[in-house]
Amino acid sequence: MSAPGAPRVQTVLGPVDPSTLGFTLPHEHTAIALWQIPNRWDYWELTRDEPIITIELAAFRDAGGSTLVDLTLPGVGRDPAWLVRLARASNLNLVMGCGWYREAYYPAEARIDRRSVEDLADELVREAGDGLAVAGLDAPVRPGIIGEIGTDKPWLSALEERVHRAAARASRQTGLAITTHAVMSDVGIAQLTVFDDEGADLSRVVIGHADSYPVLDHYLEIIRRGANLEFDFLGMSFTPQERLGEPRIVDLVLELLSRGHADRLFLSQDVCHNSQLRHYEGNGYTYLQDRFLPRLHDRGVSEAEIEQLTVANPRRILTIG
Ligand SMILES: [Zn+2]
């Protein structure tokens, strides 16, 4: 626990001293169901099977992990009680997100289409302050980051723009960082433009899924605007680019490091489907430790740089107050 008023990281079990975070995965899920929306006819899901996920998290801890950020939001399965149970069972710091994911997944009851930006921002600020009540728990569960919020397409829809504006205002009022979903395009720049327009501190913004759009100039523009980028599809194998594109991602990481941008880079695995679990012969939550970081090391990336990417950067973005 951290002293009142001191810089802190908000985990689902309460605030902790940022110095205790250790190795952190900044963009993961421990449960998510994407198939429960109209007009989606597959069955994309990360199982809500507590014994299986508990074993997967224990493997991450055994590999040296100590903190994991779960960015599942309302509408796709956010469950504070689930996170509390997993945090207790795994002895990991688990951080919960807040906000609304992307338009196709906005829950009807959130009424994003009928509420003002200010009203949406107020809800996030209230949640960050008051937390969510969980049956059987004395303390409410508070979010430690805003996100993942994002776009379905290479542009922001009208409703997504509303959510992005609300997130920016809530970030200003709460100090919480914002992390985004931005795939296969330069839409992260449009996200930053909206956040900037609302006066958000862009050094507190992480543009996610950057490895799905492997373009150096795009990365440099995110950095030029003062924000951060995240390679968080590491170890994924759903698409040919994910299966075969890692050498290029490694080259891009090295290029960004050589240009002095180690402080803006985040790494994660976005576990969001059963096939990614060890139980189903996937990589589990340990692809960075098992495979990716050794590859960076073999290419000459120093221990200090790896520590920066996996400990110091997540600690900076998660620290509030
Ligand atoms: Zn995402």
Image: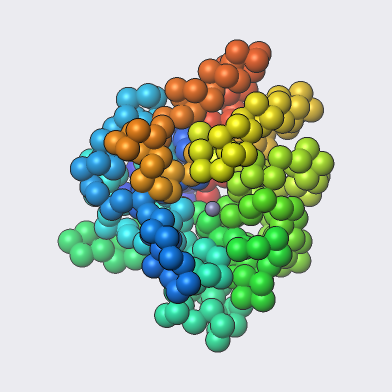
Task: Tell me where residue 164 sits by quadrant.
Answer: bottom right
Task: Tell me where residue 55 sits by quadrant.
Answer: top left
- The residue drawn where x is 31% and y is 51% is 47
Q: Position of residue 49 (x, y in %)?
A: 24, 49
Which residue of the protein is positioned furthest toward the bottom in this rendering? 114
Image quarter where the N terminus lies is top left
Q: Position of residue 265 (x, y in %)?
A: 64, 36
- The residue drawn where x is 53% and y is 57% is 147
- The residue drawn where x is 43% and y is 65% is 41
- The front one of 301 and 126 is 301
Image position of 259 with respect to 41: above or below:
above
- The residue drawn where x is 57% and y is 19% is 295
Q: How many numbered marks have been drawn onto this rendered protein structure?
A: 0
- The front one of 148 and 93 is 148
Q: Is residue 127 visible?
A: no
Q: Is residue 233 visible?
A: yes
Image position of 29 with respect to 252: above or below:
below
